[in-house]
Amino acid sequence: MPRVHEKVSYWMLVLPALSIMVCFYILPVLGIWEIAFTEPETGVGNFVKMAGSNAVKTSFVITFRVAAITTVGCLILGYIVAYAISNFATRLTPLMVALVILPFWVSVLIRSFSWIVLLGRSGLVNDALIHAGMIERPLRLMHNELGVLIAMIHVMLPFAVLPMLTNMRGISGIYVQAARSLGASEWTSFRQVYFPQTLPGVLSGALLVFVLSLGFFVTPALLGGGRVLMISEYITYQIQEFLNWGLGSALSVALLVATALVLLISARFVNLRATLLERK
Amino acid sequence: MNEPILSIKNAVKRYGSVNALDGVNLDVAEGEFLTLLGPSGSGKTTLLSAIAGFIALDEGTLALRATDITGKPPEHRDFGMVFQGYALFPTMTVRENVGFPLKIRKRPPAEIKKRVSEALEMVQMSDFADRMPSQLSGGQQQRIALARAMSFDPQILLLDEPLSALDKKLRADLQWELKDLHQKLGVTFIYVTHDQDEALSMSDRIVILKDGAIQQEGDPNTLYDQPRNRFVADFLGKSNFLEAAVIAGNGPAYQCDSKGALFTLNTQEPCRTGETITLALRPERLRLGLPGAELVSATVKQVSYLGERCQVLVMREGGEELLISRPTWKTDIVPTPGLQVSIGWDADAPVVLAPA
């Protein structure tokens, strides 16, 4: 009889979270799909309109470009941070890990506004540069893609660092020692022995940052100032400004499908289960 | 000794106020199987890491065939190394692992292929060339690690407790294989272990370390039979320690007195009349007799049966505990706790230890 009992307790444990997910997430998402295909009239009209719109195409291109550049930026910066923490620091390691996680305690909204203070026409960066005599007129650091990218990389960085850090801290220093005793230089040991072992961490960091960036709203909206229209902001416009629920919903569906495609394609190269679920 | 292949002069390594290596001088002969033996913290691994080039010495020099290599990075020393945790590269197959040092040295592919199969054959792992390390057992991984460390004909092979992660039976098998391999290849082995049995069974020469300093070095036989101090006598095998006063004699035979028990001691160590000396007595050199038959009276405290041998712990009258090891087939006396017995030894059994 313990089998039945186990099953019952399993569902008892899962049910609360599952019902919240169904009521407040799955059903509304299905509602979006319904709206996409029924407003203002039943059919695929919204999708035809979407496919024909240059603005939508541009927005998708911007979205994927920003997400891709953000991912690359986060990977490069994050790899260095994770490498330094796991290979050099000793007593400072807990502090450094805490510093990586610390930004999570501050809302994304506040972090994005802080970037506005820093990057604005008379923000700290421009002021400092002008006072130092390095430039004459303020640089355009925000309300363009550059500003969005700077802030996005900052916001997303911990999502890249953490999986890579977990992965690297599991790699014993003995492999590089072994490689060097066998005749490999420091650089060759890193490239041929250490780096391949960090690839799972790099890929999970990349996937996490890319997927999160695709649907990100707050930072691009604030730093882009309406000039860098990523899909999520485009959707908001359709619904809030034009009350065009049909097209907005169709765009949401498209974004969801695009994200699912990214996951599907990456599943061919990455073990998604290991990447997203089984973290130490 | 001919020209030593490796010469370590006054090696010092400090970690804070602790001297991990405290002035080590050591010459390693070409082709020898040298074991660095010591408890944890004795500096044996530090010494090996210094030889490998992973840590820099604070003082002292290392020379390979009379060429100074003190500051040489590990990749230019050309020493093979086998690690305790095997350290096979998990992203490479067995073949790629073994070929790694050859690929680094930019040998032609045909030669790499040939030497990899030779190395795998040497450790009887030819059938496993295309496996990943994670698909191998501990013993198999260790064999591959050995093949990898040997595939490029290193000057010296360094082994850092290579068998300590394996179970007892496998460890014994691999000990034979290692010794065999050493004889066949004639390469110099420097082997680190804390396991005295391993050291005794495989080495040509053992160096016993404690607190970063060499306590004694010599072939296994000499070390076991002639330990210089209490630490060596106790660490390599078991020993009973006895304080005795020299009352007469001037070498090689002395009359000694240990708490009223008078006995003759044969030793090459010079002793002075009137001086108190510490003697080490191996458990297997002690004789067990009926009460009154031997030199000192004692009571059996505990008996431990080990199959081929049996260990008897006795309490000497008015004094210390003594451990006796005797073959189990000797049944003249069946020791049981509480039994009155007497203990004796031959005149050349005790070893005079250096004063602590």
Image (tube, coloured by chain):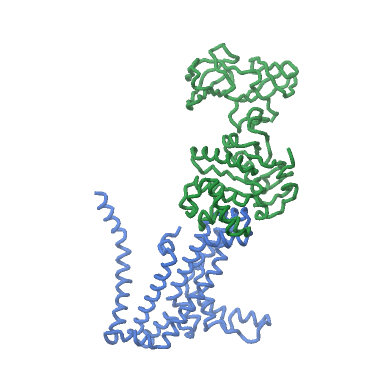
Chain colours: A blue, B green
From the viewer's perspective, tell me whether residue B181 is left or right of residue B266: left
Image position of A7 with respect to B46: above or below: below
Which residue is rendered at x = 61% and y = 39% of the image? Answer: B183
* Residue nearer the viewer, A168 or B226: B226
Where residue A265 appears, as percent x and y from the top left, is 41, 71
Q: Quadrant of the C terminus of chain B?
A: top right
Rendering coords of residue A178 (x, y %): 59, 53
Query: From this viewpoint, which residue is outermost toward the top?
Result: B292
Give the camera-side residue of B199 and A101: B199
Q: Residue at x 71, y 46 (%)?
A: B12
B130 above or below B291? below
Q: In the visual, does B121 lie left or right of A278? A: right
User: Which residue is painted at 30% across and 69% down in the image?
Assistant: A22
Q: How many marks?
A: 0
Q: Residue B298's x, y, as percent?
A: 55, 17
The residue drawn where x is 28% and y is 83% is: A38
Asked if one can make out residue A174 in the rendered structure from this viewpoint, the answer is: no
Residue A254 in the image: state x and y as whole percent: 37, 79
